[in-house]
Image (cartoon, rainbow, N blue to C red):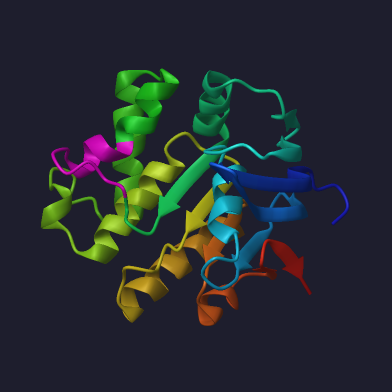
Amino acid sequence: MAGKSEIIKLADITKDYVTGDITTNVLKGISINVLEGDFIAITGPSGSGKSTLMNIIGLLDVPTHGKYILNGTDTTNFSEDELAFLRNREIGFVFQSFNLLSRSSTLENVILPSIYAGSNKSNRTARARELLTKLGLGERLNNRPNQLSGGQQQRVAIARALMNNPELILADEPTGNLDTKSGQDVMRILKELNDEGKTVVLITHEANIAAQAKKTIKIIDGRIVK
């Protein structure tokens, strides 16, 4: 572990949701440290709080209390715009439902994060082509999502996640909508990315998927259990 930098540091994270007079404590003092090159699965049953934790790690939501340091940056008092900028630069997302734009081509979907990052047009097109080709979709650049299988759509989502070359890949139930073979293909790709140095945090309720990570963190009722 010596020499590896800390990508994620969550310190005593709590998350409450208030509806009228009712306060629901979803996360109850979560502390996690993730080093560069880790491949960690966060698992737990429905309602355990793992999706809420994923949203906080992904800067899509903010904790009620506690501190979150992402790749050396303390996000505690960040504005929504600052969170969005950091999210686009540091995190690549892979979602269960793919989240592709239905009217855009494969290539256009992959390019999107780099447009927000303000990268050069020719450079971003070349990078998107390179990523899609590497993932076996070099002949599908102009296809729309409805012309692709579920496994192919998830590979497009992975290419999009890699577009800005983030340190962290955050995968939320990435095999949840896939058949067994396509799910195995996605896990193989995530393992290869991890072997290449990417830090991967995987959210899953499937024990056989979690078992393929290097480390598993289990959450029940908003707390980490050993």
Task: Locate residue 221 relative to residue 83 in the image: left or right.
Answer: right
**Quadrant into which the C terminus falls:** bottom right
**Quadrant into which the N terminus falls:** bottom right
User: Residue 183: percent from the left, percent from the top?
Assistant: 38, 72
Task: Locate residue 142 relative to residue 184 in the image: left or right.
Answer: left
Residue at 56% x, 52% y: name it.
Answer: 52
Residue at 31% x, 20% y: name it.
Answer: 121
Q: Nearer the viewer, residue 65 or 69?
A: 65
Q: Specify the quadrant of the image occupied by residue 44.
A: bottom right
Residue at 41% x, 17% y: name it.
Answer: 118
Task: Locate residue 151 relative to residue 140 in the image: left or right.
Answer: right
Residue 103 belongs to magenta span? yes
User: Residue 106: percent from the left, percent from the top?
Assistant: 21, 44
Q: Which residue reaches farthest front? A: 21
Residue 198 seen by the camera: no
User: Residue 207: percent from the left, percent from the top?
Assistant: 55, 80
From which residue to which does the magenta span run?
99-110
Q: How many tags in the picture?
A: 0
Residue 106 belongs to magenta span? yes
Residue 162 seen by the camera: yes
Task: Locate residue 16 relative to residue 188 in the image: left or right.
Answer: right
Residue at 39% x, 31% y: name it.
Answer: 113
User: Residue 80: percent from the left, percent from the top?
Assistant: 54, 23
Q: Nearer the viewer, residue 69 or 214?
A: 69
- Up-down relation of residue 57 to residue 30 (above or below): above
Q: Specify the quadrant of the image occupied by residue 211.
A: bottom right
- Up-down relation of residue 61 to residue 193 (above or below): above
